Structure formats: C-alpha cells, structure tokens
Image: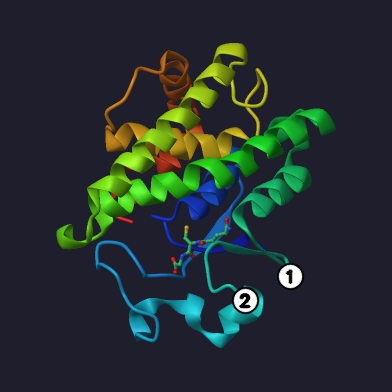
Amino acid sequence: MPIKLWGRPSSARTQKVLLALAELGLDFEFILASATMGPVGHVAKGNPAYGIVDTPAYRAMNPNGTVPTIDDDGYVLWESNAIVQYLAMTYDPARFFGGDPKVFASASRWMMWENNELIGPMHNYVKHTIRFPEDQRDPKLVEAARAQLIAAWRIVDDQLGRTAHIADNAWTMGDIPMSIRVHRWHLLEVAGPPFPNIARYYDQIRERPGFATIADPQMHLIG
Ligand SMILES: N[C@@H](CCC(=O)N[C@@H](CS)C(=O)NCC(=O)O)C(=O)O
C-alpha cells in the first residue's frame, strides 16, 4: 500500500516530506488537506473550505490540525522533521545519513536549526512582504527579519565553506529543509551580501532529480 501524505503543496513542511519521498523514489498518495493559504487567499477556521485538517477524523490522527501527516501501512506520524527521519531510517539510511549515527546527529542538528533559526524570520519576511494585505505590512518587521536571516545565512555559508553539503560532504537528510529555505531565499531576491558557498550549494541542489518536486516558484511565493 502506498504511503499516504496529507499536506498542502505550498507548505514548506509538506515540501520536506515531498522531497524525502522523491529522493527515495517511493510511490505515495497525496491528499490535499489544508486550504488556509494559496491562490484562494486566507480561509478562516470554521469555513468548510478550510480543509480536512479541521475535521475530527484528521484531528484524531494529528491533534494539531496541521500538515503534514503520513500513514505508512497503519503507522501514523506528524511533525515534518520526524517524518523525514522515519522515512530515512526505514527506507534508506545509507543515502539519508550514510548509515552513521554521527552523520545522523549532524543532519538532525541542521534540521532542528532550520526549525529554530530560519523558519521564524523567514515567515515574518514573507508575511510582511507578500502574504499580508499591504495595509497590514510592517516595514520594521521586514527589516528585523532580513537582518536575522542574513546573520543565519552567514552561519550556513561558513559551514558550506567547510563541507560540500550542510551536514557532511555527502548529501544527507539535513539538506532537505536547507534546500527549501535556500530556494525560497533566492526566489525572494532579498537584498544582502553575497554568500558564495550558498550560491554554489544552490546550483548543486537544483541538479538533484528530487528538486523538481519543489522547484515551482508558485509553491513558495503564494502560500
Ligand atoms: N512543527 C510542525 C508544524 C506544522 C505546521 O505548522 N504546518 C503548517 C503548514 S507549514 C500548517 O499546517 N498550517 C495550517 C494549515 O496549513 O492549515 C511540522 O514541522 O510539521
């Protein structure tokens, strides 16, 4: 039975799972579970168009009412980074972390770091430049987010000066969240200093066959 994935294509967390499945070449069934954002605009909770994330059946699987969630032959899991790690350990430990606990921990560290350091300022930047109606955008928050992102990207650029990929010379699961963030950063065309190692990395990750899954700018700029 193929893995079931409940998600929203414009959600970066859903994209992590899409990238992992593409790297594994696994068949899966995609269920569009959320319509809170996208070409139709923001839909409030309680509106039937909100999506199945708000139904009792979905909340029985994922009490947060968020995406993504997977069901792999009866094993239900939510929390995007945990899903990627489960897929890695179950289906291809060698490809996803060289089958090595130290590489696993290094990759896992970058997955957590992305969650802790990049998502917040990137969401603020996108909300206050693209997602919110113009009268709700705050230029001070945009500038604060830009400064935080530049400081964070400097850490990434330094690391990519030491290793070809984020957690190791080889590609690992740690490159999944990083690929999505680096792609978004380039699509947003934020003013800032050059990051030569990130530019080299961006060329590299776009060459991977799985990247086509998340390449479409509409998946990043409308959500
Ligand atoms: N920490 C969770 C966060 C899940 C989350 O907040 N997902 C967002 C999309 S990226 C969501 O479901 N938002 C509400 C919605 O789209 O209906 C994870 O990484 O899976």
Q: Quadrant of residue 104?
A: top right
Where disc 1 sits, the SS reads loop
- As drawn, which residue projects farthest toward the front? 140
Q: Is mark 1 within 8 Å of ligand 1?
A: no
- Pinpoint residue 64: horizontal percent, then vertical percent: 58, 72
Instruction: Report which residue position mark 1 lands on.
Output: 74
Q: Is residue 214 above or below residue 195?
A: below
| Vertical relation: 155 (above or below) 93 | above
Q: Nearer the viewer, residue 20 or 158?
A: 158
Mark found first going from the N terminus, 2 or 1: 2
**What SS does tag 2 mark?**
loop
The reply to whether residue 22 is visible in this rendering is: no
Q: Please identify the residue farthest to the right as the structure is shown.
A: 101
Q: Amino acid at mark 2?
A: Pro
Which residue is at a point 61% across and 48% down the rendered structure image?
Answer: 26
Residue at figure coordinates x 39%, y 81% from the top left: 45
- Separation (CA) of disc 2 from disc 1: 17 Å
In the picture, the disc for residue 63 is 2
- Identified by mark 1, the residue type is Gly
Give the x, y percent position of residue 134: 16, 58
The picture places residue 37, in percent across and down from the top left corner, at: 33, 65
What residue is rendered at 46% in x and 70% in y? 33
Quadrant (top left/top right/bottom left/bottom right) for the C terminus: bottom left
